[in-house]
Amino acid sequence: MLKKSFRLKTKDIKNFFSKKYKKIFTDILIVYFQENNLNHPRFAVSPKKEIFKKAVKRNKIKRQIYNILREILKTKKIKNYDFFIIIQKEENFLNLKELLIKILNNV
């Protein structure tokens, strides 16, 4: 799991969509992002309920994404953005990792 300082809270997510944001679409993920005034990035992950019907699967995919993000944060410096990630399709761990690294490097 990510540290609390790297996670978006519910009230922050509500404020997130009230401001201007940019988005990146892929077959597997939708990533919304905007700049923040902090010295570090923050993340929120939400799997689509239509795709992952059981809460067990949704929680597993969220844990995997947070684990990937934690590894990326250890090795690379990510700009000061708030990221809201929606998972649209079930994919294996390695493909998710490659895709997230590619997206976060291009932001």
Image (tube, rainbow, N blue to C red):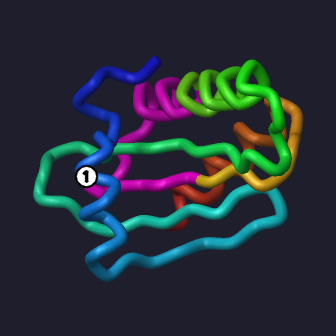
- Find residue 67 and report its horizontal and vertical position in percent: 57, 23
At a point 75% along the width and 41% down the height, the residue shown is: 96
Q: Is residue 68 left or right of residue 56?
A: left
**Bounds of the magenta segment:** 68-85
At a point 54% along the width and 42% down the height, the residue shown is: 45
Residue 49 lies in the magenta stretch: no
Q: How many marks?
A: 1
At a point 74% along the width and 44% down the height, the residue shown is: 98
Q: Which residue is mark 1?
A: 12
Mark 1: amino acid: Asp
Dot 1: within a 10 Å radius of its alpha carbon, few (fewer than 14), some, or many (20 or more) residues?
some
- Find residue 86 and report its horizontal and vertical position in percent: 62, 54
Residue 76 lies in the magenta stretch: yes
Q: Is residue 32 left or right of residue 94?
A: left
Q: Is residue 32 left or right of residue 97?
A: left
- Find residue 101 and report its horizontal and vertical position in percent: 62, 47
Which is nearer the eye, 34 or 19? Answer: 19
